[in-house]
Image (cartoon, helix red, strand yellow):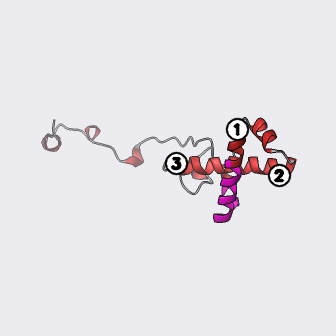
Amino acid sequence: MTMTAVLKDKTATSDSMDSVPEFCHYEDTGCEVSDACLNCPLPQCKFDDPVWYQRNRRLARDFRIMYTIQQERLSMEEAAARFSVTVRTVFRILQRCRNALSSADSQQFEVFAA
């Protein structure tokens, strides 16, 4: 049945058309960042831009690794073994951290350190 037929049909009920969003049941279950969307500390939803979320989440992890390396004075080999990555990945992590620190405020990544 086409939309014009539904509109012309006097027996068509409001159930046959989309209902107004206000009348739909929506349960705000949140995600791993926050228990509810309205309480979320992120500047945008992780589902709206997954690439943005993954990039910032990786940078938060990288900052934790860099902080651990500095605090515990780990060698590159020790850090690689501790975090189950290769030595080359440790160098990449440190480079990403240096680039991020020079271009942005590291405080913005604390939200992703869940």
The residue labelled by disc 2 is 70
Disc ID at residue 51: 3
Q: Secondary structure under badge 1? A: loop
Q: Nearer the viewer, residue 72 or 46?
A: 72
Element marked by disc 2: helix
The residue identified by callout 1 is 86
Q: Which x, y percent locates residue 101?
A: 69, 61
Q: Quadrant of the C terminus?
A: top right
Report the mark closest to the observer, 1 or 3. Answer: 1
Q: Which amino acid does the dot numbered 1 rest on?
A: Thr
* Region rendered in magenta: 92-109
- Residue at 52% x, 40% y: name it: 27
**x 70%, y 37%: residue:** 85
Q: Tell me, yes or no, whether the highlighted magenta stretch contains residue 108.
A: yes
The number of callouts visible is 3
Q: Position of residue 79 (x, y in %)?
A: 78, 41
How crowded is the residue under tag 2: few (<14 C-alpha within 10 Å), some, or many (20+)?
few
Q: Local crowd at mark 1 within 10 Å, few (<14), some, or many (≥20)?
A: some
Mark 3 or mark 2, which is nearer to you? 2
Mark 3 vs mark 2, CA separation in Å: 28 Å
Task: Say if residue 95 shows up in the picture.
Answer: yes
Q: Report, in whole angstroms, how far the alpha carbon at label 1 lies from the one at label 3.
A: 24 Å
Lower position in the chain sequence, tag 1 or tag 3: 3
